[in-house]
Amino acid sequence: MRERYGLEISRSSDIGPGLYLGHAYNITVNPAAIIGSNCNLHKGVTIGQENRGKREGAPVIGDCVWIGVNATLVGKISVGNDVLIAPGAYVNCDVPSHSIVLGNPCRVISRDNATGGYINRKVQI
């Protein structure tokens, strides 16, 4: 899968049920990252590790998180539940539940039902 589609998702990755890969090309997930249930990753998403500094480590992502095209999440950060990360966003800070994340540097906007209508293939957890 890595050579044909550019998918770099380790078999040892901790990923909950209901993962949806929209346009599944060039997606990279660090093996130390944790991804919750019913999350959507789209083309060009990178979930990476930071190797030094105060955010040394990999992201922990909650349930029902939608991550748009070419978004990047790096470092030991926590992303809550019901979070929509906009295409092209660069996220290197903690994100509370029920939020929308935009831009670089990331801007967090509080929003109830942030992923309403966005999550594909939702399974009961």
Image: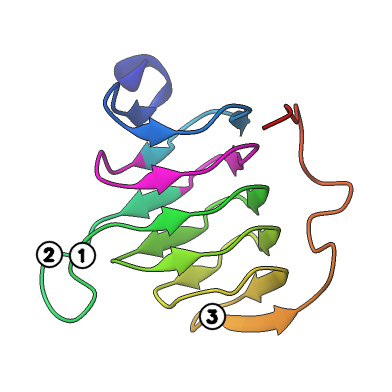
Report how many numbered discs are placed on residues in the image.
Answer: 3
Q: Counting other residues with Cα less than 10 Å from the Cα at mark 3, is it few (<14), some (14-19), or many (20 or more)?
A: some
User: Which SS class for mark 2?
Assistant: loop
- In this rendering, the answer to whether 46 lies above or below 16 is below
Left or right: residue 61 compared with residue 8 = right
User: Do labels 1 and 2 touch, CB within 8 Å?
Assistant: yes
Q: Which mark is residue 98?
A: none
Instruction: Please state the horizontal and vertical placement of residue 93, each as a whole percent of the image.
Output: 42, 78
- Give the residue furthest to the front: 125
Instruction: Please state the horizontal and vertical placement of residue 59, each as a whole percent of the image.
Output: 36, 58
Residue under the image location 63 percent in, 72 percent down? 101
Left or right: residue 4 compared with residue 119 = left
Residue identifier under label 2: 51
Dot 1 amino acid type: Glu
Left or right: residue 15 compared with residue 30 = right
Dot 3 amino acid type: Cys
Q: Which mark is residue 50?
A: 1
On the rendered image, what quadrant is the N terminus found in?
A: top left
Question: How did the renderer colour the structure?
Answer: rainbow
**Range shown magenta:** 29-45
Residue identifier under label 3: 106
